[in-house]
Amino acid sequence: MKKHNLYIAFLFIVFSGVFNTNAQGEHTDNKDIISLIEKKRAYNKNNGTGYRIQLYNGQERQARSLRNRFQIEYPGIYTKLTYKAPEWKIQVGNYKTRLHADRALNKIREKFSGAIVVPM
């Protein structure tokens, strides 16, 4: 009798697992999910997640002069000067991956030794 109950329980578990797996596969074509994924991709494209290289974090006068020097040395690379109390920050570039940011950092560190990679 115990073997019979054990056998029935085993079959029940196997069949419920198979039906549960098939039920999950049917919902992959849901238009709402596809719409949300497209919205997320558009948001990431516009607002972006990625990395920048931070050149300096400190006083305003030094930050502005360092930014001007960077723009002369590397024309065409995006620079951003921001103020978050009590310090000014210079961040440069827009890199999608850490690998791209690290490659650029190696070149920039030749002239700006205190540069670091930071997330956006």
Image (cartoon, helix red, strand yellow):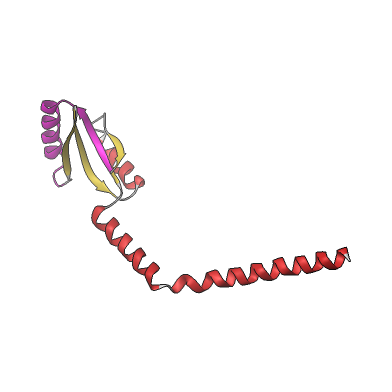
The quadrant in which residue 67 appears is top left
Q: Nearer the viewer, residue 103 or 95?
A: 95
The image shows residue 11 at horizontal and vertical percentages of 75, 69
Q: Nearer the viewer, residue 15 or 91?
A: 15
The quadrant in which residue 103 appears is top left
Q: Is residue 68 above or below residue 10?
A: above
Q: Image check: 105 left or right of 63?
A: right
Residue 111 seen in the figure: no
Looking at the rendering, in which quadrant would you find the N terminus?
Answer: bottom right
Q: Is residue 113 above or below residue 16?
A: above
| Residue 112 in magenta stretch | no
| Residue 75 in magenta stretch | yes
Q: Nearer the viewer, residue 44 or 20?
A: 20
The image shows residue 24 at horizontal and vertical percentages of 54, 69
- The residue at the point 72 percent across, 69 percent down is 12
Q: Image check: 113 left or right of 21?
A: left
The quadrant in which residue 89 appears is top left
Looking at the rendering, in which quadrant would you find the C terminus?
Answer: top left
Region of the chain picked out in magenta, as a range: 52-76
The image shows residue 107 at horizontal and vertical percentages of 27, 39
Residue 71 seen in the figure: yes
Q: Is residue 117 above or below residue 24?
A: above
- The residue at the point 22 percent across, 45 percent down is 93
